[in-house]
Amino acid sequence: MQTNFTLAQLADTDLNEANSILRACVHCGFCNATCPTYLLLGDELDGPRGRIYLIKDMLENNKPATALVAKHIDRCLSCLACMTTCPSGVHYAHLIDQGRRHVEETYRRPRFDRVLRAVLAWVLPYPERFRRMLLAERLARPFAFLLPRKLQAMARLTPRRLPPPGLVDESRVFPAEGKRLKRVALLAGCVQKVLSPAIDDATLRLLTRHGCEVVLAPGSGCCGSIIHHMGRDAHEFARANIDAWTAEIERGGLDAIIVNASGCGATIKDYGYMLRADRDYAAKAAKTSALAKDVSEFMATLGLKPAAIMTGQRVAYHAACSLQHGQRITAQPKELLAKAGFKVMDVPEGHVCCGSAGTYNMLQPELAGALLARKIKNIESLKPEIVAAGNIGCITQIAGGTGVPVVHTVELLDWATGGPKPTALN
Ligand code: SF4
Ligand code: SF4
């Protein structure tokens, strides 16, 4: 694609990067074929190629975003199916990040949207605030029908019962069972440890059972992806995690930083890029990104112990976009589940997002609902006994649309190798 940035613009690191990304695009439109929003709406501006043109126009001409541009950029799920499909290697993820930032900086959204986004950004990355908000929401639930549509969508996603805090609520070290083979850090995270602490507990048991000493580093918390995908600056979250893990590296060394929410993993693997222009953090950020591993990716290299029980249950494996497109991890979770004795089935149209996408299901409830309905139809066509996924967002979204129990892949691996049966299966 021809671009027309001035030399002065190209002196800017971000615009220079945008220029390189845009120039790789040959506007073939192959990416439209796998884009969920193009699939639903059939509008060129709701596909990756159209969005690329919108972003190019804003950045090249330094134009403020209009309501129309914001609408089409906001409808993007950042699922990155387009990156998997693109034959020219266009790095759409880094371009849409710039596009979102530009919209955030130059467009004034309607008041309700501004407040809703501000509240989500203020609450979700902080577990204590999120826990309190969920408790307040439970009191208000009988009046949910009085709420605007977007708030009703939020209410539908909150759990009926708030689980008690799990093991990762405090910074500490969990010793390896038997001989220590690896020393790893586990991302403490934010939303997941409130909604489903059982996932972190299962991860801790699985890792320690396989000879890993697991560190919950003081100062590590939200990875920043929630606000990053809203076009806001997430660098402070990244720096806090990098500082926490760098201190651990200096204290006892780390073989890996384990992430069990693939949306967070994709962001942490991008810290090196996010902070590439920060003199104090660029090297540490690159090191952090290199150490970051999805739990399934790590377990595949470590090797799963023989299963203690082989249930042979039919598991529909839902590939989270941030795992399959964002991190290009596709085979490992399925191979681990098969080794653990489950009959693993691929969900038809597996490349299409379930509609969760961070805060998307709250900010774009209609589109998210249409994608969820499509996903549920595809999942239920397999007649599974269990659905497994590697991302809390997908788990919450899918569980809201089906009676089939939805669990994290690690909960099944933990169960099969000696842990308790996941509560959702009881
Ligand atoms: S598939 Fe790649 S090269 Fe083709 S239009 Fe889409 S982003 Fe551009
Ligand atoms: S990230 Fe997903 S929704 Fe956005 S343009 Fe690409 S394929 Fe479409």
Image (tube, rainbow, N blue to C red):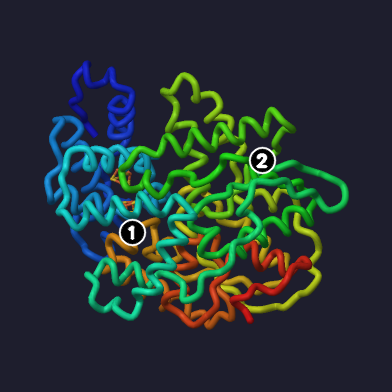
Quadrant including the N terminus: top left
Indicate the amino acid at tag 2: Ala
Indicate the amino acid at tag 1: Tyr
Q: Position of residue 334 (x, y in %)?
A: 62, 63
In terms of depth relative to the viewer, which is nearer, 120 or 60? 120
In terms of depth relative to the viewer, which is nearer, 81 or 371? 371
Observer able to see residue 337: yes
| Gap in angstroms between the C-alphas marked 2 and 1 | 30 Å
Quadrant including the C terminus: bottom right
Q: To which residue does mark 1 refer?
A: 360
How packed is label 1: few (under 14 Cα within 10 Å), some, or many (20 or more)?
many
| Residue in the picture at 22% in, 70% down | 148
Q: Quadrant of residue 248?
A: top right
Give the total number of marks visible in the rendering: 2
Which structural element holds mark 1? Answer: helix
Q: Position of residue 187 (x, y in %)?
A: 58, 47
In terms of depth relative to the viewer, which is nearer, 217 or 17? 217
* Ligand 1 image-quadrant field: top left
Which structural element holds mark 2? Answer: strand
Q: To which residue does mark 2 refer?
A: 256
| Residue in the picture at 22% in, 64% down | 41
**Disc 1 Cβ-to-ligand 2 distance below 8 Å:** no
Residue 61 appears left or right of 151: left
